Amino acid sequence: MLKLLNSNRHSNNSIVEMQHIYKTFNKGSVNEVVLFTDFNLNISQGEFVSVVGSNGSGKTTMLNILCGTTEIDSGKIFLKGQDIGKMKEYQRAASIGRVFQNPAIGTCPSLTILENMSLADNKGSTFGLTPGINKRRIDFFRSQLELLKLGLEDKIDLLVGSLSGGQRQALALLISTMTPIELLILDEHTAALDPRSSETVMELTERIVREKKLTTLMVTHNLRYAVQYGDRLIMMHKGNSVIDVAGEDKNNYAVSDLLKIFNEISVECGN
Amino acid sequence: MDVFLSIFNNILEEGLIYGIMAMGVYISYSVLDFPDLSVDGTFPLGMCITAALITAGFNPFLSCIIAFICGAVAGCVTGLLHVKLDITNLLSGIITMMAMWSVNLVVTRGSAVLPYYNQPTIFTSGPIGILPEGLYTYRVVIIAALAVIVLKILLDMYLKTKSGLLLRAAGDNQQFVISISRDPGKMKIIGLAIGNGYTALAGSILSQQAESANINSGTGMVVMGLASVIIGLSIFGKVKIMKATTMVVLGAVVYKACLAIAMLLGLPTNFMKLLMAVIFTIALVSSNFMKKGRNKRHAETPEF
Ligand SMILES: Nc1ncnc2c1ncn2[C@@H]1O[C@H](COP(=O)(O)OP(=O)(O)OP(=O)(O)O)[C@@H](O)[C@H]1O
Ligand SMILES: [Mg+2]
C-alpha cells in the first residue's frame, strides 16, 4: 500500500542525483546496520524538499552521504551533473551550505560575529595574508544581520559564544547562505530551539530560500513545518522513502494524515 | 642591591627568550587546541642547528632564520603524522620529539654539548655596535626584548590576516572550516609549523646567549611553555587591551621569576623539575577553576 504513494519522479533538470546508494554500518560485526540498499533520490533545481521520518530512519545519514561526511559502499552521487562521490567533505562544501541541529556547529564561538561573517564571506576565495576583515564589507554584514531582526547588527564585535542558541542558529543560517551555493542542507536546524526561536528561524529559512531560489533539503521532526513549508515532502523509513509527493499531492496532506501513516509504519514494524 | 639587579636581569633575559617559545606554544595549544609535545625536540633542534652553523662561520642572524625554518619543518612532520596518518595529537608530538633526538645528534656530530665561545652571535655582532657603552651589560635583555617585540607584532599581524583568522577558526570549530570549504588539516599543519618555528628560534637565541648548545636542554620545554601560556593568560586575561601574545610572554617571565625566587630561598637544584611540575599543576588547576567561574557568567572573555 505504501508503495503506491511513491510518485516515480525522474526529471532531467535534477541538481542532486543519488543513484543506487548502498550503505551498511559496521559490516560483518554484531553491530551491523544495513541502512541503504539501492536508495535513489533526485532533486530538481530550485526545489524545497522537506524530509520526515522516525528516529534511525536514515535522514541524517542521507545528508552525510551527500555532504561527504559518511562514505558509501557503492552508488553514485551527482551535484549539478558533476560526480562528487570521490570529493572530500570540504571540497563539496564549496557548493553546499549546511546548518546542523546543534547551533554550536555552524559558527565559531571564540570569534566575533564580524569575524565569523568575514570568514564565511570569503568562502570560495583564497585565505592568504591580506587583512581578515574587509572594513568595506561591514555595512553589507550589518544589512544582512538586520534581516534577522534580532538586533545583532549593533553587536558585530560580540563573541558568538555569548549568543543564545536561537541567535547562533539564525546567524549560522545567514552565514551558510551568504555566498552562492547550489544546495542548502538543513538537519533539524530548529530542533534545539524554543518554540518562538524555532518559528523565527523557520520563517527566516523560508524567506532566504525563496529570495535566493535555493535548492533545499530540510530534515525536520516537526510535521507541521514539513506540511507548511517546502514544495515536496519525503517520508523516510528504514532507509527507504515511503512517501514522496510534490505539488497538488503534497497539498492534500495534513499533519494528521502524516501522523497516521507514521503510526501505521510503526505498527507494521511491530513497535 | 647589585645582586638583585643581576638576578632581575637574569629573569628578564631568560623569561623573554622563553617567551618566544611561549608564543609558539600559544599557537599550538591555545589557538589550535593541540597539546604539541614535539616542542621538547624542536627547542634543542634550534640550539644545535645554530651552534653548528655559527661554528661553520654562518652569520648569526641568518642562523636564527634557518633555525626557525628547521623548527617549522619539524612542526609540519608532527602535523602530517596527525592529519594524514590519523595518529593522535599527543603521539604525533612524541614521535617527532623522539626523532629529533637523533637529528640533533647528527647536527652536533654526536656530541651532547657543542660550545662555540667567542664566536659572533646576535648579542655580540651586527647592530649591537650602536649600543652605548653603559648599556652593554644589558645587551641580552635589550636584544631579547627587541626580538620578542618584532616576533609578537609579526604573530599578531598574522592572526589578523585571512589565513590567521582561519587558523583560529580551525582550533575553534573544525566543522565551520569545512563549511567554508577549507581543509582544517592544512591549517593544523600551518599552525604547528609556526609554533615549532618560534620554539626553535627561541632555542637558537638561548644558545647564542649561552654560546653553546645542549642536546638535553629540551627536557621539560613543553611543561615550561604550557605553564607560561596558562599562567600568562590566567593572570593577565582580564586586561582588555593586552593581546594574548603579550600575556604569554609575561607568563614566561613570571614563571622564570617563580623558579628564581625558589632558588633564592634555597631550593636544591635537584628539585627544579619537581618544582616545575608543581607550578604547572597549580597553573592548570587554577585555570580550570577560573574557567568554570567564567562559564557560569556566560562566557564573555575568550576561551583558552
Ligand atoms: N557512524 C555510524 N555508525 C554506526 N551506525 C550508524 C552510524 N551513523 C548512523 N548509524 C545508524 O544508521 C541508522 C540511521 O541513523 P541516522 O542518524 O541517519 O537516523 P536519523 O533518521 O537521522 O534519525 P534521527 O531522527 O534520530 O536523527 C541508525 O540505525 C544508526 O544507528
Ligand atoms: Mg538525524
Image (spheres, coloured by chain):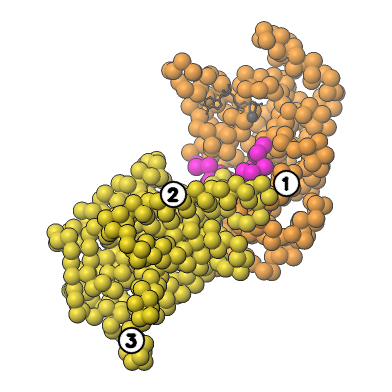
Chain colours: A orange, B yellow
Ligand 1 lies under 8 Å from the Cβ of mark 3 = no
For disc 1, the chain is A
Q: Whereabouts is ligand 1, in terms of quadrant?
A: top right
Which dot, 2 or 1, sits closer to the camera? 2
Which amino acid, by three-letter code, is at mark 2? Answer: Thr
Would you place residue A182 above or below residue B133 in this image? above
Dot 3 or dot 2: first in sequence order is: 3
Would you place residue B138 above or below residue B94 in this image? below
Q: Which residue is at 72% across, 31% downward? A: A220
Q: Which residue is at 50% across, 61% downward? A: B232
Q: Which percent across, then down, holds residue A199?
A: 82, 39
- Using the numbered discs, state the Cα–Cα distance from disc 2 to disc 1 in whole angstroms: 34 Å
Estimate how packed mark 1 is, as few (under 14), some (14 to 19) or many (20 or more) residues with alpha carbons within 10 Å: some
> Which numbered marker is on residue A164?
1
Labels 2 and 1 share a subunit: no
User: Which residue is identified by label 2?
Assistant: B281
Say which of B242 and B35 sits in front.
B242
- Using the numbered discs, state the Cα–Cα distance from disc 3 to disc 1 in whole angstroms: 57 Å
Labels 3 and 1 share a subunit: no
Q: Which percent across, then down, holds residue B6?
A: 35, 77
Residue A217 visible? The answer is no
Q: Which residue is at 65% across, 31% downward? A: A42
Q: Which residue is at 56% across, 41% downward? A: A82
User: Which residue is identified by label 3?
Assistant: B136
For disc 2, the chain is B
Which amino acid, by three-letter code, is at mark 3? Answer: Tyr
Estimate how packed mark 2 is, as few (under 14), some (14 to 19) or many (20 or more) residues with alpha carbons within 10 Å: some
Which amino acid, by three-letter code, is at mark 1? Answer: Ser
Q: Which residues are magenta?
A: A87-107
Say which of B187 and B221 sits in front.
B221
